[in-house]
Image: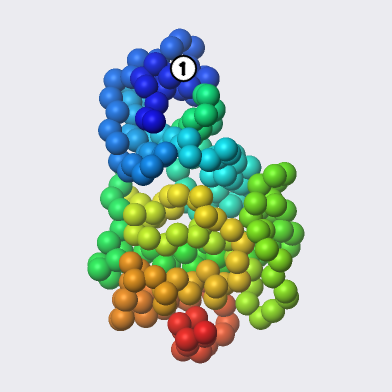
């Protein structure tokens, strides 16, 4: 059930540290699914993004947001977490509001920007994992990010956001990319993380899939040949 205004105001006062109970000026639902939702909320003049859910006993995304290292948060380009609180059985996560538009996988410019950003993210997190896996997060979140052991191999381990749908890439007016929705984030081999391009029909197809991988490969900075890399990812 969507939180009532009174519950939302009480949660915001606690999570965002309002001196007084804030007034709920405006609420606009951006996405809704059974047991969870995302809203744009204006609280006493302050605009925030609110993610709430009561379909799970714990809020994995809030845990990750709160314990990712600053280097990882910067590499993700994600909205800044502002606070999280649980009221009854409902988990509420407050995030910085970022103005922008969702990506369009039929637009070559969007595809280039999004997968360039993903390449930079994978390059940064691969380096952190190689140095020390705990450079990603701390405590309970560390175990969440390594759901299964991967044997050593040629593919570097990267932090994979887990869902490369266009709605999870936000483009600002100055062409900065912000990643959203980390419910399925985990550490995976690079090729596994990118194989969604082959298997998920909602992602760029055909020449745009080649464009995505080319942009990714250049930004990721690995030395292997780009043609062999595409063949390994899309044909593996």
Give SS at disc 1: helix
Quarter in which the N terminus is drawn: top left
Residue at x 30% of width, y 81% of height: 207
Q: Is residue 36 above or below residue 89?
A: below
Q: Can residue 226 be seen in the rendering of this structure?
A: no
The percent position of residue 233, horizontal first and vertical second, equals 50, 81
Q: Is residue 203 above or below residue 140?
A: below
Q: Can residue 20 be seen in the rendering of this structure?
A: yes
Residue occupying the far top of the picture? 20
Where residue 216 sits, quadrant-wise, is: bottom left
**Rendering colour mode:** rainbow
Residue at x 65% of width, y 59% of height: 147
Residue at the spot of label 1: 10
Is 49 positioned to the left or the right of 80 in the image? Answer: left
The percent position of residue 20, horizontal first and vertical second, equals 45, 10
Where residue 160 sits, quadrant-wise, is: bottom right
Residue at x 61% of width, y 62% of height: 187
Is 159 positioned to the left or the right of 164 in the image? Answer: right
The percent position of residue 30, horizontal first and vertical second, equals 30, 41
The percent position of residue 55, horizontal first and vertical second, equals 48, 39
Q: Is residue 36 above or below residue 106?
A: above
Residue occupying the far left of the picture? 106
Disc 1 residue crowd, few under 14, some 14–19, many 20+, Cα 10 Å: some
Q: How many marks?
A: 1
Residue at x 36% of width, y 20% of height: 5
Is 24 positioned to the left or the right of 155 in the image? Answer: left
């Amino acid at each position: 059930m969507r939180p009532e205004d009174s519950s939302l105001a009480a949660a915001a006062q606690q999570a965002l540290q309002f001196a007084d109970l804030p007034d709920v000026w405006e609420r606009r639902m951006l996405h809704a699914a059974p047991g969870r939702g995302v809203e744009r909320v204006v609280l006493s003049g302050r605009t925030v993004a609110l993610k709430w859910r009561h379909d799970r006993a714990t809020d994995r995304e809030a845990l990750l947001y709160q314990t990712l290292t600053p280097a990882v948060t910067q590499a993700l380009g994600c909205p800044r977490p502002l606070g999280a609180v649980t009221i009854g059985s409902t988990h509420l996560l407050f995030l910085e509001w970022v103005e922008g538009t969702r990506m369009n996988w039929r637009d070559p410019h969007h595809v280039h920007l999004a997968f360039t950003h993903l390449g930079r993210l994978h390059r940064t997190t691969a380096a952190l994992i190689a140095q020390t896996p705990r450079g990603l997060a701390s405590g309970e979140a560390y175990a969440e990010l390594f759901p299964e052991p991967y044997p050593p191999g040629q593919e570097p381990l990267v932090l994979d956001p887990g869902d490369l749908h266009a709605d999870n890439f936000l483009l600002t007016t100055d062409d900065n990319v912000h990643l959203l929705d980390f419910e399925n984030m985990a550490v995976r081999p690079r090729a596994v993380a990118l194989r969604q391009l082959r298997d998920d029909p909602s992602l760029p197809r055909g020449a745009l899939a080649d464009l995505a991988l080319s942009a990714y490969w250049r930004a990721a900075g690995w030395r292997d040949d780009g043609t062999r890399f595409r063949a390994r990812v899309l044909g593996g």
